[in-house]
């Protein structure tokens, strides 16, 4: 279970997260929605210790992330796959090496690594793209490689940062399907950050809205769709003020 | 005014503290040989390929100019074979390391800052960390080691090139014989001339690559930020290089 406990983080004196509290149940996919620049990515980065909180913490299976030493943090990161917004593929490496990189840190033989890479690429429908370079791929393919890189490690948790932003509707639907498939196949617990409501409804078990540094409302998809909170309503309906 | 000065001081102290932290992290990455070993070889080739042509080009012209300037300065009062002394000493002690160093700052330091800056703003550095790699051992250590070890080699070749072109210029343009040139070259030669220049070069190579990495990894703000980091890396490392040059002269040549 991942729990954000009263997380606070400011940059240059400007608070971004200001008492962010949220519980992500095992086996579920929790979607965090919210306007651009409200701190959704900042919240995700605290889960894997890429950022240090000013106060509060993220608790992953009982471990307070900000208190972990290097070895414990590395152990924690092995359980968490992170899919970055623009995929963050390593430009100088082939698709194969991108996916294999994390596996090379494990005690696996070259054959096992190759098998795991093939398996992950098959799951994202990219079999045959092993030798291509990130620069030769479309945005949707890059995202899929990013997902393959995360699932190749067989994590217990996957964090997706805006997986469908910037993609056309069909490609977005493919990515949505992929996230659902990943959850079913690998039984991973997921956090998906997005402002794409169609995607949120497709992949989410629960939806939480981040607003002004706090969770404004959290509920099942049905609860959110029927919300009476004007802020949440406005966001999910995409109405200008 | 005082407030601004105070803030500047605090910023400077923070920067030094941050740098100390960075070097500490770097030291911690050293045992991770499996990660940085192979990558260091890749970077060594890159440092060599990127800076050797420029360094040799500059050294070749410097050698010629030094020979001509020496004969111009001596105006017949000083024996002409001192041209060899001046070319050799100047190339070995100062111009070889410093000119090649400035070229390296412009080529290698800038490209490392741009590369790591791009990786930073596109979250590739974060991605490395989530894949359980330490950016210090994966990105920084190979580059700094490559700079520190390759740069003396590049400078040695540059010095050699400068002396050879100085010698050719003496033969062709100054009517100096090879014997006389060599006589001048050997006259005040001490072994220290060689190791001083090369040791200094190693510290330059270390500084330039370290600055490139530190500046690159602290990049913020997209493509514009990468551009800023690139110029910043060149300016910082050039300034540091000149300061370091003066420092070594003070410490080792007195
Ligand atoms: N490392 C950082 N340093 C300074 N400011 C940051 C940093 N990371 C994020 N921010 C700021 O925090 C705010 C929230 O960013 P982010 O989490 O990326 O928003 P989003 O909800 O769109 O993902 C933005 O204003 C951003 O500029
Ligand atoms: Mg974001």
Image: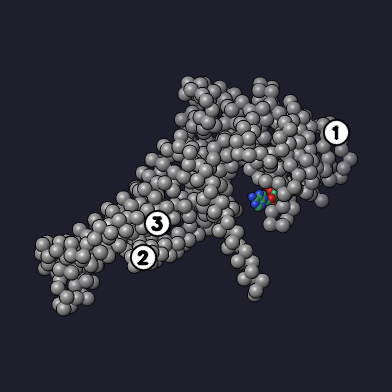
Discs 3 and 2 lie in a common subunit = yes
Residue B13, which numbered label? none
Residue A223, which numbered label? 1
Q: In which quarter of the image is the N terminus of chain A?
A: top right
Q: Give me the C-alpha separation between circle 3 and circle 1.
A: 63 Å
Q: Where is residue B80 in the image (x, y as percent from the top left)?
A: 15, 71
State the residue in front, B37 or A117: B37
Q: How crowded is mark 1: few (under 14 residues within 10 Å), some or many (20 or more)?
A: few
Left or right placement of residue A174 versus residue B88 in this view: right
Point 43% across, 65% down: residue: B243
Point 18% across, 65% down: residue: B187
Discs 2 and 1 lie in a common subunit = no
Point 23% across, 67% down: residue: B86
- Is the residue at mark 2 in contact range of ligand 1, meaning its CB lies under 8 Å from it? no
Left or right placement of residue B100 versus residue A52 in this view: left
Label 3 secondary element: helix
Which chain does tag 2 point to?
B
Residue B2 visible within the image: yes
Label 2 secondary element: helix
Which quadrant holds residue B204?
bottom left
Which chain does tag 1 point to?
A
Point out the frontmost of discs 3 and 2: 2
Left or right placement of residue A54 versus residue B78 in this view: right
Q: Where is residue A197 in the image (x, y as percent from the top left)?
A: 75, 37
Which quadrant holds residue A224?
top right
Which chain does tag 3 point to?
B
Q: According to the image, label 3 marks what residue?
A: B204
Q: According to the image, label 2 marks what residue?
A: B249
């Amino acid at each position: 279970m991942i729990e954000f406990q009263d997380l606070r983080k400011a940059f240059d004196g400007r608070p971004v997260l200001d008492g962010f509290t949220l519980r992500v149940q095992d086996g579920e996919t929790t979607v965090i929605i919210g306007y651009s620049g409200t701190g959704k990515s900042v919240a995700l980065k605290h889960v894997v210790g890429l950022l240090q909180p000013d106060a509060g913490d993220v608790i992953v299976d009982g471990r307070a992330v900000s208190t972990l030493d290097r070895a414990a943090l590395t152990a924690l990161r092995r359980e968490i796959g992170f899919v970055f917004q623009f995929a963050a593929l390593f430009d100088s490496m082939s698709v194969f090496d991108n996916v294999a990189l994390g596996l090379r840190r494990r005690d696996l033989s070259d054959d096992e690594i190759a098998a795991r890479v093939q398996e992950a690429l098959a799951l994202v429908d990219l079999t045959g793209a092993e030798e291509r370079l990130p620069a030769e791929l479309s945005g949707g393919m890059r995202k899929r490689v990013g997902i393959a890189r995360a699932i190749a490690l067989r994590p217990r948790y996957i964090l997706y940062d805006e997986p469908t932003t910037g993609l056309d509707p069909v490609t977005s639907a493919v990515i949505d399907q992929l996230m659902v498939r990943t959850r079913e196949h690998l039984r991973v617990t997921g956090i998906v950050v997005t402002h794409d409501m169609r995607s949120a409804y497709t992949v989410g078990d629960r939806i939480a809205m981040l607003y002004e540094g706090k969770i404004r409302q959290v509920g099942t998809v049905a609860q959110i769709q029927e919300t009476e909170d004007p802020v949440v309503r406005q966001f999910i309906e995409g109405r200008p003020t | 005014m005082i407030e601004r000065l105070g803030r500047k001081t605090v910023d400077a102290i923070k920067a030094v503290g941050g740098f100390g932290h960075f070097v500490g992290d770097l030291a911690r990455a050293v045992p991770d040989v499996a990660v940085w070993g192979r990558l260091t070889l890749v970077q060594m080739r890159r440092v060599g390929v990127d800076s050797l042509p420029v360094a040799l080009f500059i050294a070749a012209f410097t050698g010629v100019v030094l020979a001509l300037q020496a004969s111009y300065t001596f105006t017949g009062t000083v024996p002409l074979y001192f041209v060899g002394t001046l070319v050799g000493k100047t190339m070995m002690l100062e111009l070889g390391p410093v000119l090649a160093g400035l070229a390296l700052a412009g080529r290698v330091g800038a490209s490392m800052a741009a590369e790591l800056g791009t990786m930073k703003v596109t979250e590739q550095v974060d991605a490395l960390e989530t894949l359980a790699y330490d950016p210090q051992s994966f990105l920084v250590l190979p580059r700094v080691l490559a700079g520190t070890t390759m740069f003396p080699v590049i400078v040695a070749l540059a010095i050699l090139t400068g002396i050879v072109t100085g010698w050719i210029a003496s033969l062709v343009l100054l009517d100096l014989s090879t014997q006389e040139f060599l006589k001048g070259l050997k006259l005040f030669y001490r072994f220290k001339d060689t190791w001083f220049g090369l040791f200094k070069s190693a510290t330059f190579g270390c500084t330039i690559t370290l600055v490139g990495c530190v500046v690159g990894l602290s990049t913020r703000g997209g493509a514009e930020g990468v551009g800023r980091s690139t110029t910043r890396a060149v300016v910082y490392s050039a300034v540091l290089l000149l300061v370091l040059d003066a420092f070594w002269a003070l410490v080792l040549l007195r």
